[in-house]
Amino acid sequence: MTDVLITAGELAELIKTEPCVVIDTRNPDAYGAGHLPGAVNVHEIFTYLATSTPEGIEELKTKFADAFGAAGLSGAETAVVYEQSMNSGFGQSCRGYFLLTMLGYPKVKVLHGGYDAWVATGLPITTDVPTPAKASFKIVPEAGSILIDAKAMLAAVGNPAIAILDVRDVDEWIGDSSSPYGKDFCPRKGRIPGAVWLEWYRMMKPTGEGPRFKSKDEILAECATVGINVDTPVYLYCFKGARASNTFLALKNAGVKDVRMYFGSWNEWSRDPSLPIEEGLPMPAMTSKAA
């Protein structure tokens, strides 16, 4: 795939040569204090809690097709999504990338390093709020195959051919907390049975300029620790699809061919008592000892 990540310097040049719509996913106060010139604030990219019923998926698609159309995306423009920094917004810029890709938008970039990288490069910011011309946003139905529902995730439980990848923080993985919003935000704590775990931070590494994604080979090395290679079908989840979107971008950039996301994630799964969970500390993998 074409690299989705774009540096601040590259974006500054792209804006001069191609039609772009820049989308700021931060909260309105942060946006109001200063943002990239021309950037449109769409904070609901981060806040929206999705469900994976047919009605919930239809609402998700319609809501964001409308929001992206209102931001001025017609298909001709490159959509560029950013957050404050790559580890401060739970992957919210990548959630924008996932939503746009799931809707079939043809040209999507994520500003690598976010707003902080733009400022550190010495590029201009503004408090001016643009009034974008509303565009007609076209949904491409077949692009939605990267979005899976609870039924598809349940069908993957116990299927050794599919890697269920949990990327939540460690306290959620071990069942100590139900969410990043408080230990008891959801009714049940735990994880989807059979899931393997790579905390989403492991897709990135610290640099002098702030967190940046690891290289393709580094990401594949992380994946190999839980048995995932480029040919492994991967079903991702987190709490609401933000941190998993960060990992989705990392895996796709690294060449993993079949990556899908259970966007309802733990927020939905934990609220349905008919769905199975594992609680407590994960059991260690069984190892065989030579006689």
Image: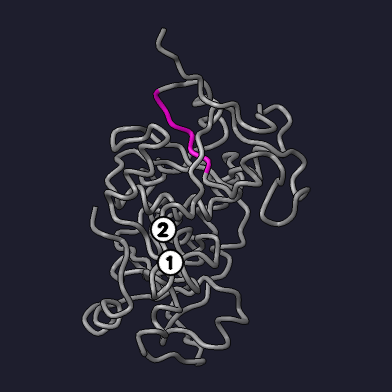
Secondary structure under tag 1 reads: loop
Asked whether residue 163 is drawn in magenta, I would say yes
Q: Identify the amino acid type marked 1.
A: Pro
Residue 90 appears at what percent x and percent y? 55, 60
- Residue occupying the point 67% across, 36% down: 190
Farthest residue, direction front = 291
Q: Identify the amino acid type marked 2.
A: Met
Asked whether residue 254 is drawn in magenta, I would say no
Range drawn in magenta: 161-166
- Residue occupying the point 38% across, 44% down: 222
Q: Given contact means CB atoms under 8 Å apart, are the residues at marks 1 and 2 in contact?
A: yes
Q: Which residue is mark 2?
A: 204
Residue 65 appears at what percent x and percent y? 47, 60
Residue 211, numbered label: 1
Magenta: predominant secondary structure element? strand
Residue 80, numbered label: none
- Residue occupying the point 24% across, 85% down: 16
Residue 35 appears at what percent x and percent y? 48, 84
The answer to whether residue 81 is left or right of residue 7 is: right
Mark 1 → mark 2, Cα distance in angstroms:
6 Å
The answer to whether residue 161 is left or right of residue 263 is: left
